[in-house]
Amino acid sequence: MSLQNQTGTFVRPDPEAFQAGLATIDWDATQGFYADTTNLAGAGAYPMAVVTYVVLPRNRGQGRIKRVLDLFRLAFRQGAQQAAGLGYIPVSPQLARQIEAYWRNASAR
């Protein structure tokens, strides 16, 4: 179903349109990467998307947490094609770098 975005363009929900909208977001680590994805900007952007977040407890031991983060690093670096093949929009390389920097800063606290 095509939806009208902020520019007045009707856009179909395809991977490129979702990526166009998500690319306009200022992912702020100080806000836990929270973003309102219900009215995404951009001429070719589908106006809404759902973002999945992961919450990891810090009291599980550093070894266990490191293994979980290593799994996400692997997914960021090598899993984009598999994610896209399953109909997901992979995390952009730029956002993956921001998330990994957030992890480094969080583990230093």
Image (spheres, rainbow, N blue to C red):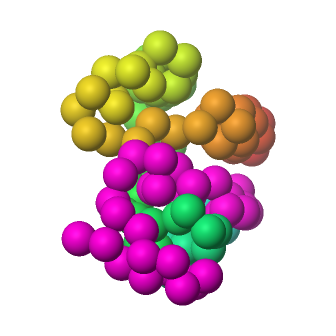
Vertical side of 93 occupied by 88: above or below: below
| Quarter of the figure with residue 88 | top left
Q: Which residues are magenta?
A: 1-30
Residue at x 45%, y 56% (from the top left corner): 18
Answer with left or right where residue 97 lies relative to residue 84: right
- The percent position of residue 80, horizontal first and vertical second, equals 44, 25
Please state which of residues 22 and 105 is positioned toward the viewer in this rendering. Answer: 22
- Assign the C terminus to one quadrant of the image: top right
Asked if residue 66 shows in the view, the reply is no
- Name the quadrant containing residue 97: top right
Queried whether the magenta region covers residue 94, the answer comes back as no
- Percent across and percent down for residue 52 are 37, 54
Identify the residue at image location x=53%, y=64%: 45
Q: Relative to residue 71, is residue 92 depicted above or below?
A: below
Q: Is residue 48 above or below residue 77?
A: below
Asked if residue 13 is among those painted magenta in the image, a careful observer would answer: yes
Residue 15 visible in the snapshot: yes
| Residue pictured at 33% horizontal, 60% vertical | 13
Percent x, y of residue 35: 57, 70
- Quarter of the figure with residue 24: bottom right
Q: Quadrant of the N terminus?
A: bottom left
Q: Find residue 76 and report its horizontal and vertical position in percent.
A: 51, 25
Question: Is 57 on the left-hand or right-hand side of 22?
Answer: left
Single out the residue that lies furthest toward the front: 9
Q: Nearer the viewer, residue 106 or 92?
A: 92
Q: Exactly how many numbered labels are in the figure?
A: 0
